[in-house]
Image (spheres, coloured by chain):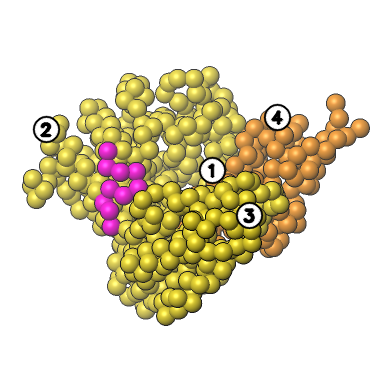
Chain colours: A orange, B yellow
């Protein structure tokens, strides 16, 4: 049996920050190896899903990186609408709240 | 020398450096104390602006610098730090030098430091471009020209560059008590001293990357002091007190911080590859790290430039009327259109931030349809002069205060203006305009060091 949970339910750290004024990088650290492996293998964090949630094109998703030692996954994207940190239309100088659209990404987990 | 011990101590002025942790670090007999104090994260304004103590303010900067220099002099070891948070411009670096002067006067110290500017002379840069120096934008975005142009250089009020470890190594050889640098590559500050002793570049860079933000590499992460022991084939990193510990997971996780890619970090003269690194728990609060590699590439420095786009004025107001909250978007658009009509001859922008209604995430907020019962509104105007920005902002506020919308009953005023003065002039406004790599034959060419003595006789 399986059930579907929001991605945030599996994470200990869920954060975002500028990786230069033009990119946002979103880091997730998982509670344990099981949660990390489940998300890594689920394929839910794919460029198409990320792009849809962040209002960017798939080509703007520059990478989805995983690191086993830290139970961590990193997503780096171009900023939405090309608005750089400090541009007059922008509202998040440090890029610190840009992880929000990914919090509810559905993840299928074993039901136990 | 088989081991170099490094006490890390931030020079940003964030106030997380503490005397207790520094004392704990000094007991471990460090060879050098190193801190980073520059960043582009707080935005382009700080590179453009002229306040020498701008950003966190003089007192915060003075406390961190005072602890760092005090510790170095107490232990009679060199200090290396970047200063002038956050931009590392010459203007902001001068603030740090004046702080060093004050510290020397107040404590009766005689300080002698090698000082390196991180600012790039625009004429020098244009000569480089004319002589065919290769440049490329670091991020592929339409906001930046693919290769740096003289026009883009001229558009910037200031340009800084992240100096690598090489100019800092040259400054360390000048036989002073320490080095103060403007805008710098963070890890270069930590790499310079060990590189003088021929430590492996990949291992040294990984050590530097691990401790650059202090105990952000610990669990739970915080920007406090940390300590590293760099040896010929590995390094140890640990916290200096309290309940925080470095764990294999926390140290490995720090590779994520503010970086595009976990495994490959491009730096002047090469990239750091940590895919081959291993992490072992050495004791309760210490992690042993080995195995990262440095791969050489052509030498480049990263240029950062801020272009002035005018002056900004803002107004903050609360909106509570239920009819107004319901009809807000059209109402704001009509007010903006009236401003465009009234001030048609001027080039300006009006931006509304509706806190309580997708101000943070805009169209990608997953809760798009949720509307609260009140909205915190920021009106932001950028115009060619401060006076124009304030006039336009005041005009828009007037439109909002007395304008009409469906269901309006509030004929004495529609909005709750937060402050008197209603309009807040914010000074010059900037955008990032240069974010390019410049190839260099000599990593030290734009970064000569000069020796300064403190107290500085000219400032007494």
Total label count?
A: 4
**Around disc 2, counting alpha carbons within 10 Å, would you say few (fewer than 14), some (14 to 19), or many (20 or more)?**
few
Q: Are marks 1 and 3 on the same chain?
A: yes
Chief secondary structure of the magenta span? loop
Of the two numbered discs 3 and 2 on the same chain, state the one appearing first in sequence.
2
Q: Which of the image's four quarters has the N terminus of chain B?
A: top left
Q: CA distance from mark 1 to mark 4?
A: 20 Å
Does the residue at mark 1 contact the one at mark 4 (Cβ under 8 Å)?
A: no
Which residue is labeled 2 in the image?
A: B108
Q: CA distance from mark 3 to mark 4?
A: 49 Å
Residue B390 placement (x, y as % from top left):
37, 64
Mark 2 belongs to chain? B
Place residue B35 in its image quadrant.
top left
Mark 3 belongs to chain? B
Q: Are marks 3 and 2 on the same chain?
A: yes
The span picked out in magenta is B50-59
Q: Circle 1 — which element? A: loop
**Around disc 1, counting alpha carbons within 10 Å, would you say few (fewer than 14), some (14 to 19), or many (20 or more)?**
many
Q: Is residue A49 above or below residue B158?
A: above
Which residue is labeled 3 in the image?
A: B323
Name the disc covering residue A32, or none.
4
Of the two numbered discs 1 and 3 on the same chain, state the one appearing first in sequence.
1
């Amino acid at each position: 049996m399986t059930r579907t949970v929001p991605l945030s339910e599996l994470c200990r750290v869920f954060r975002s920050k500028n990786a230069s004024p033009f990119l946002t990088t979103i880091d997730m650290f998982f509670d344990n190896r099981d949660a990390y492996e489940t998300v890594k293998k689920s394929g839910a964090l794919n460029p198409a899903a990320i792009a849809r949630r962040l209002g960017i094109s798939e080509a703007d998703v520059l990478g989805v990186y995983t690191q086993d030692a830290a139970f961590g996954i990193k997503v780096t994207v171009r900023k939405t609408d090309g608005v750089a940190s400090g541009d007059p239309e922008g509202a998040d100088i440090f890029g610190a709240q840009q992880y929000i659209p990914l919090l509810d990404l559905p993840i299928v987990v074993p039901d136990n | 020398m088989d081991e170099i011990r490094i006490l890390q101590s931030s020079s940003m002025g964030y106030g997380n450096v503490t005397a207790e942790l520094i004392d704990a670090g000094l007991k471990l007999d460090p060879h050098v104390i190193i801190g980073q104090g520059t960043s582009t994260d707080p935005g382009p304004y700080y590179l453009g602006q002229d306040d020498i103590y701008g950003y966190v303010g003089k007192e915060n900067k003075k406390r961190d610098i005072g602890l760092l220099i005090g510790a170095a002099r107490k232990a009679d070891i060199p200090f290396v730090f970047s200063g002038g948070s956050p931009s590392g411009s010459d203007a902001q670096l001068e603030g740090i030098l004046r702080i060093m002067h004050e510290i020397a006067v107040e404590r009766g110290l005689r300080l002698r430091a090698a000082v390196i500017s991180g600012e790039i002379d625009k004429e020098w840069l244009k000569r480089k471009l004319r002589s065919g120096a290769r440049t490329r934008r670091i991020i592929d975005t339409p906001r930046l020209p693919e290769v740096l142009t003289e026009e883009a250089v001229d558009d910037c009020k200031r340009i800084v560059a992240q100096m690598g470890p090489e100019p800092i190594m040259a400054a360390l050889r000048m036989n002073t008590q320490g080095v103060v640098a403007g805008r710098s590559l963070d890890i270069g500050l930590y790499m310079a001293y060990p590189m003088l002793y021929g430590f492996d570049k990949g291992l040294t860079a990984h050590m530097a990357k691990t401790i650059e933000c202090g105990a952000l590499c610990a669990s739970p992460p915080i920007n406090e002091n940390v300590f590293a022991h760099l040896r010929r084939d590995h390094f140890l990193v640990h916290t200096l007190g309290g309940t925080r510990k470095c764990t294999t997971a926390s140290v490995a996780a720090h590779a994520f911080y503010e970086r595009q890619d976990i495994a490959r970090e491009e730096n002047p003269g090469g990239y750091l590859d940590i895919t081959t690194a291993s992490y072992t728990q050495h004791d309760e609060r210490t992690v042993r790290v080995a195995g990262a590699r440095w791969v050489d590439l052509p030498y480049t420095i990263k240029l950062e430039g801020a272009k002035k786009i005018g002056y900004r004025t803002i107004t903050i107001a609360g909106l509570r009327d239920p009819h107004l909250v319901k009809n807000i978007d059209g109402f704001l658009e009509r007010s903006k259109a009236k401003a465009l009509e009234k001030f048609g001859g001027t080039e300006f922008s009006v931006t509304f931030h509706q806190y309580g209604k997708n101000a943070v995430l805009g169209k990608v907020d997953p809760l798009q349809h949720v509307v609260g019962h009140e909205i915190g509104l920021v009106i932001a105007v950028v115009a060619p002069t401060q006076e124009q920005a304030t006039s336009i902002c005041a005009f828009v506020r007037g439109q909002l205060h007395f304008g009409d919308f469906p269901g309006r009953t509030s004929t004495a005023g529609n909005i709750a203006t937060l402050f008197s003065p209603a309009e807040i002039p914010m000074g010059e406004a900037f955008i990032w305009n240069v974010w390019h790599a410049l190839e260099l034959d000599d990593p030290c060419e734009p970064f000569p060091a000069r020796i300064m003595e403190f107290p500085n006789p000219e400032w007494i």
